Structure formats: C-alpha cells, structure tokens
Image (cartoon, rainbow, N blue to C red):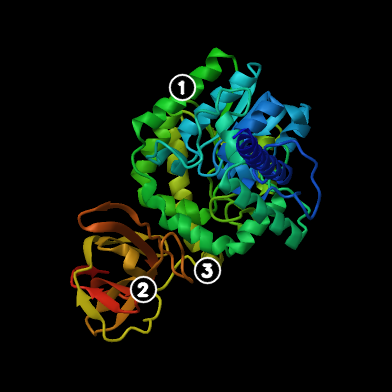
Amino acid sequence: MSENFAMWKKFFAGIIFSTLALCVAISSFNIFIDTYNIFDVPKKVGINFSAYKSRNTERFFKPIKIIDRKPKIIFLGNSKGDFGLNPDCYAELTGRDKSEIYNAAIQSGRIFEARNFLEHALKINPDIDRVILGIDFEMICEDSDSMPGFDSEQLRKNHITAKNFFAATLSGDSLKDNIFTLRKNLAGKIDYPVYDDNGKMNEKMIDEIFTAENSFYKNSRYFIANQRRIKNLPDKHIDELKKIVEICRERNIDLQVVILPVHAVQLQSYSLYRPELENILRKVVDVVPVTSFLAYDEISADENNFWDSLHIKKIIGDKVIETLTGREKSFGKIITPENVDEYLSNLWAAGEKFAPENPEVMKNFKFVARFSPEPNFSNLIETDFAEIKRAEVNDFPGGKVFFATAAVKNPEELKEIYAVAENQAGERFFVMCDKNILIGEINLKNIMTGSDDAGSEFVTEAIFDFPPGEYALKIAAVKNSGEKIISSSVRTLKF
C-alpha cells in the first residue's frame, strides 16, 4: 500500500510541477511579448517591439503607466487628444522635463472617465500642477455609464491588481493576443511602438490605422452621420465637469479645458443641431472657461491637417499646445459666459458663407453622397420582418439628410439590410446598411442596439442629392440563406 501511495504521490507531484512549469512558461511569454504595454521589458524589432493590442486597451495600460511615470502634468480626454496632443512638444515649449508629462487621453473617452483618471493620477502623485482636459460635444453627450475596458478597481492603486496581472499573463485571451502580436511583429518587423512612452499614440501607428480604414472620407462620413448624439447635455456630465473643476481648484492645479479643432465639414454638420449645441456650450462655460478651436479658417478647410473630420494631426496639435502655453496668440479663443453668444453668432455666420465660398472643399470631400444602384434584387418576398418606426428628411448643407429607424425581427438571420426608396415611376434606390460600417460613397450609419418584442432596432442615415418628389420607404434584406425579402411596413417620404 505504501508503494501505491508513493506512486500516486509522485504522479500528482509531477502533474502539479508540470502545471506550474506550464503556467510559468505562458506567463513569461506573455510578459516578454507584452502586447498590452504594461511591463518594463526589453523591446526587439521583429519580436515584441510593437505592443499591438495596446491600440485598443488604453483603459487597461494607461493607469498602470501613470503608476510608473508619476506625472506632474496630465492630458485627459478622448481620441482627439490621444492622437493629436504631444507631451514632448509641451515640454519643449515650457522647459519642463519630458518625464513629468503624460497623455492619459483614451479613445471614446467619457467625462466621468476623465475625472476617474485624474483622481487616480493624484493618488499616485499629489503634486500634479497642471491638467489639460480636451472635451467635445460627442464626448460629453454620450449617455453611457461604463465603457469596455474601464476598470475602477485598478484606479487609485499604486500597483497592478492581481486580477489585471492574471488577465495580462495567464488568461486565454492574453495568450491569444500575445501570439497575434508576435506574428504581427515577425511578419512586418514593425520598428515603431503603438504608443510612445509619453502616452501619445505613435504617428506611424495612427497613419497605419487610417490608411487601413480608407482614411479621411470614409471615417468622416461615419462621424457626420452620427451627429444625432448631440442632444441636450445630461446633467450628470455637467456634474462630472464640476467635480474636475473643484478637484483642481482645491489642489491649486492649473486646469485648461479645450475644444480641439474639427474639419469645416464637421462644423457644417453641427449646424443640424444648432440649438442643442448652443445650449451645451453655454452650460459648459458656466462651469469653466473653455479655449475653443472651432472655427471656419484655413486650418479647418484643409483636410491635410486632419486624419478625418474629427481628429487633428500632430502639426495642428502642436499649434494648439503653442496656444495653451502662450506662444501662439491668434489661434483659438477663450469662451466665457460673457462672450459665448458673440462667439456662436460669429461661428454660424462664417458657416453660412463657407460652402458657397469653398466649393472645392465640399466637392473634394464628396459631401453630397448618392444612393447606391439597385443590387441584384429580384423576386423580393414581402414579409413583416421589419417595422419602420420613424422616417424623415431634413435640410443639410450640401444636400438632404435621410433618417430612418426600424425594428427588425431575428436580425441574426440577416446578412445584409437595405433602406429602399421608390419613386412614383417605380424606380428603386437602395441604401445599404451594415452594422457600424460605411459602404462605398454612401454616408450612413447603422446601429444594431438593444432588443425588444419587435426585435433589434437599427438606424440609417444618408446625406444625398436627390430629385424632389414623393417616395415610399421600405426595408429590404438578404438572409443568410440567400432569400431576399422586403418589408410590408412602408412610410412616405417627401423631398
């Protein structure tokens, strides 16, 4: 019996040892490749130089980098600041040490996240003396209480949490992500990081992203079609802004709040929501003065200054920093309750002149999109798979905005979805709706969200130039099986 016991003991000891050895090997591999950019390991071109998955995990790695760097100056905001504001430029213009400044802006950042990141940074280094907060209408109007990857447990701690260490070293996702990163490095021999040490996304990485995503036009159409988010500002977001202001005031921190430049055609799209936008800006400047770079000028009219209609390139980001450090006097304007009405009046007046005075800008942007030609649809089967909830046409600079919402039954069975406008002569014009994707030259947005008795909601929007008349709107789809269907639900649109 003792021999059997010894044998089983040796067997289980071997299993435990092998398991531990495997865990150590996996953990060591994940730490060395470091796809999330959180470990201080040697970087070698062609192996682990580019921490590729960090491009989508700023909420994960930036709080940890703040622990390491202990910055005294911090940039907060969303992707506009993440892509466009360079801490090294700020250091050069102010004479500050580069290691003191960190760009903690995160893609799709929310105002509540900015407040949490600020509190985290102050927990790590109470001697922060300057905060630059980039805000925009999209950021503060999002009615969202949480974002994927936002981890409140990691914030305000001076070490990586056990949960996050396990997630980065021993989870199945981390192994998969690190293998992907190794392959990416081996295949491309990428000689640049995804993020620079100062927290700003590397310029070559940004260029790669936008080149892969068809650059300026496609992404700009997406953002312009998405302006419906600019509604009344939720009070909770104003409360978050007040908390940031109070924190900085109590600690004698120099807070600069900025609205970064956007392309002129993005400003044109804002005119759809003029009352809402004016209300939002007035509420914001009642809390804190804002340096606004929104303007119709040579910078905003030149697409070479932008990655797309919302995101500035570094050359303009550096010019913004020159303004914030007092080196540039003619770029940007400080907005307060006393001058906000004058500022808005001048902005809209400039906008009314812009399109007729700059036809080439509008033409090059292809601002007026057109319906796609009819796809190979024949023998459409009429069903009740979609119910049109809303359909309308609004005026828009350069064309009209077609906007529709519908509820779709069993969306998982559908391969493609179209909005179909049919005129009195029987001609059909199709707008293809593909979840969060812009197709061809059509400016539209489709979002599958939520679920109710009627099925999933989707939204589509297109800016177009279309003959006047009356049109019947229906929804068509191609099922995964190849069957082609059209809704029995119909709405009348008048252009």
Amino acid type at circle 3 is Lys
Locate the N terminus by quadrant.
Answer: top right
Q: CA distance from mark 2 to mark 1?
A: 50 Å
User: At label 2, which amino acid type do we have?
Assistant: Asn
Above or below, 266 relative to 13: below
| Disc with the residue nearer the chain's start (2 vs 1) | 1
User: Hey, which quadrant is residue 459 in on the image?
Assistant: bottom left
Q: Which residue is mark 1?
A: 243
Cα distance in 3D space between marks 3 and 1:
44 Å
Q: Secondary structure at mark 2?
A: loop
* Tag 2 residue: 480
Amino acid type at image mark 1: Lys
Q: Nearer the viewer, mark 2 or mark 3?
A: 2
Q: Secondary structure at mark 1?
A: helix
Element at badge 3?
helix
Determine which residue is flagged by label 3.
363
Task: Please give left or right for residue 327 compared with residue 361 in the image.
Answer: right
Q: Is residue 329 visible?
A: no
